Image (cartoon, grey):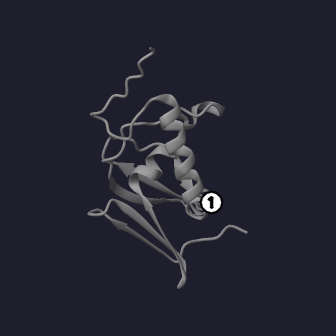
Amino acid sequence: MTKLPTAIKLHKTSKTLELQYAPDEVYHLSAEFLRVHSPSAEVQGHGKPVLQFGKIGVGLNKVEPAGQYALKLTFDDGHDSGLFTWEYLYQLARRYDALWDDYLAELKAAGKSRDPSESVVKLML
């Protein structure tokens, strides 16, 4: 059975989406985290995910329901495709720490940065 949030709050200042499932089950997902884990084809790459980088300052402009099964998130970098189903959001919330650690490891391995103004250069000596 899909777990539905009992409350959803967009915190524009802290750039987080708060999802509450029970009084003692509240999650805060950063806009950056949601952006790099977007279920869109642009990010998921039709089976081969495309590493997103330079998204440290991204924020959320809008959160809208998509029928009875998902949320449509509009990010301030223009990204607005991909629907975050209730099940996907709950999995992101529950696995936040592991998914974030994996993302940071992927960035490092690819020589990419969360900062859009930073470029990592590897020297072969």
Most foreground residue, 84 or 37: 37
Residue at left offset 36%, top offset 48%:
75
Residue at left offset 45%, top offset 15%:
124
| Image quadrant assignment for residue 118 | top left
Left or right placement of residue 124 versus residue 85 in this view: left
Left or right placement of residue 98 versus residue 112 in this view: right
Residue 94: tell me if it is visible: yes
Residue at left offset 37%, top offset 42%:
55
What is the quadrant of the N terminus in the image? bottom right
| Image quadrant assignment for residue 31 | bottom left
Q: Which residue is mark 1?
A: 91
Q: Secondary structure at mark 1?
A: helix
Residue 42: tell me if it is visible: no
Q: Position of residue 39 (x, y in %)?
A: 55, 45
Query: Furthest-top residue in view?
Result: 125
Q: Position of residue 110 (x, y in %)?
A: 50, 29
Query: Furthest-bottom residue in view?
Result: 23
Most foreground residue, 41 or 106: 106
Most foreground residue, 68 or 35: 35
